Image (spheres, coloured by chain):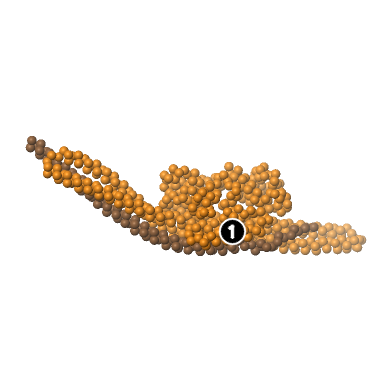
Chain colours: A orange, B brown
Amino acid sequence: MEKINNINLEPEEDKNILKKTTESIERAAGKVSESFDHSKLKIKTIDKIKAVWNGDWLNYHDRKSAKAMVKRESAEEKIKILTERNKADQEHFEELKKRSYGTQDILLSKVEEEFLKSRQKNIKKIERAKNKKDKAETRVRYYENKKIVYENRVKNIVGRVTEKVDKRLNPHEKKLAKIGSQMEVLNEEIKVFESDKIELLKYADDLKAKLETAIFKEEKKGLKKTISKIEAEIRRSEKLKQERLSEKSKLENKFAKVNKKADKWKDIRNEFSRFTNRGIGHRNIEKNIENPDLENVKIKNDESLGKEGAGVEKSKEDMAESARGFIEDVDKGGIPIMVTKQLRTVLGAYGFNEEEINSGTPKDLIAELKLRVEKEDKDKERLVMSLGDYINYWNKRYGSRFKIESKDLPADILKKEASILALEEQIRTQYEIMKKKKNITNSFSERELEKNLKSLRFLLKK
Amino acid sequence: MDQDNNQKINQEDDLAKEAEDLLAKIKKTNDDFEKKSKILVEGIEKDLDEVEKESEEMDRELEGVLSEADKEIDEANEEFTQDAYENEEDDEEDDID
């Protein structure tokens, strides 16, 4: 996985990416076939999707599409210029013809010859530009359609998995919840029984004390016998309690085992459902590992990620998606039975401390988590600004190496407010255009662009 | 003296009755708990056995689903990672003049 995530996507490496990523995926697939543990299989499946969905393959398609768009625009511009040039030449020639009054026929016919030659040449160029425009258009459509087709296909697959897991897991979870309540009842019964026993024991002790004061032999004998029976019953009650506690412990172990299995599928469902809830353009997971955001959460030794996943950075956004998975479960009527490791991690990322996690019920914790996620979503929605302002921020920080000229952009576009992510896309487009026009220093790579966009995003969020 | 004795006898009779009542109460508490908790334990055991069996079936079925999805993802990834224009050279720069 690390290989895939760390591939350097310098434009000149585009051609190698096919080979590199295919090899990485093949390696991952090879490991899957070697594995008999199916829980590992799901990690691989998810990683395979992530590798393409969020990784450099998406960038590859985006860049290819952007390149084709630039070509298309350039061809359009060329067609426009050549058409205008032909029109101007024609007008110029007509003007000359008018002025000559038929007196300079030889010169005029030479000019006409030149004009026709140039016109023919331009027409050929226009034809070529039109072909290039069509070709570029086809490429744009090809790369964009590929993303759509892939997104739909993956969503279809993960949707099917989520649905099947849901269908199988939901009744199972309900049964587990029922067993959980029965266990609670048993627990309560044992507690009540124990407290009754203590009460009766006190009573028996009082009787024993009174027995000491008894005078009559017969009565004393009878009483002693009864007290002995009481003591036997008390011993029986202790034995009963111990038996039930032992049975309860066995049941709890078995319950935890079955629960763990259910949790495994629940985690799989949550992981898969993330992909049905977002589009392919959503780029966030495991990018820029070498330069993580301060707000990222580091997860170590998370078994759910498998060996290769341990220690990787999970972004806050990734956590948000996991959180949404848990919230959706409850909203759909799911009953959370225990705080799983994954839920604990998510809660930690949302500022829950150990004490809160340990003292709250899973249901209450998820309800509180929902409130925190909703608040965060609202805060995010508020993070919008105009393109003009964003460009100012950009130029202040990175203008010395990649300056964006606001004056080149229409005023209405500059004033229009948009989300930070949309503004970043505008900067990427500007970068492609300026790179094409060679208005940008070669040392300012695409990787650097992405790094700076990310840093600026972080600063603006703060 | 007789009166005292009678009073003492009565007190000890009461005490004996009290002890009998307590014995009956403890016995009933034990019997009730034994019966009720046994039913509960057996019920939980039965449900757990059923759920455990179901869990194994679920594992098998869903692992099949995952395995199938894995293959489909492989196919989708393979298709997505193929570029029809991969080997095509970039267009040469055009001169307008």
Furthest residue in direction top, as rendered: B1
Looking at the image, residue A125 sits to the left or right of residue A106; the answer is: left
Instruction: Identify the residue shown where x is 17% and y is 44%.
Output: A224
Q: Is residue A195 above or below residue A255?
A: above
Which residue is pictured at 61% across the width and 57% down the height?
A57
**Residue A280 visible in image:** no
- Between A106 and A460, the one nearer to me in the picture: A460
Q: Position of residue B24 (x, y in %)?
A: 20, 48
- Circle 1 packing at 10 Å, graded few (<14), some (14-19), many (20+), is some
Q: Residue furthest left?
A: B2
**Residue B18 or A252: which is nearer the viewer?**
A252
Q: What residue is pinned by disc 1?
A: A24
Query: The N terminus of chain A lies in which quarter of the figure?
Result: bottom right
Question: Residue B43 appears in which quarter of the rendering?
Answer: bottom left
| Above or below A104: residue A213 | above
Mark 1 element type: helix
Q: Quadrant of the C terminus of chain A?
A: top right
Amino acid bearing label 1: Ser
| Quadrant housing residue A258 | bottom left
Residue A30 visible within the image: yes
Chain of the residue where label 1 is placed in the rendered structure = A
Could you say where residue A453 lies in the image, as x and y percent from the top left?
63, 47
- Where's residue B34, x and y in %? 27, 52
x and y percentages locating residue A289 in the rendered image: 58, 49
Q: Residue furthest right?
A: A103
Q: Quadrant of residue A61?
A: bottom right
- Identify the residue at horizontal 49%, vertical 44% (top origin): A351
Left or right: A298 as drawn, with respect to A175? right
Q: Nearer the viewer, residue A332 or A95?
A: A332
Point 42% across, 62% down: residue: B57
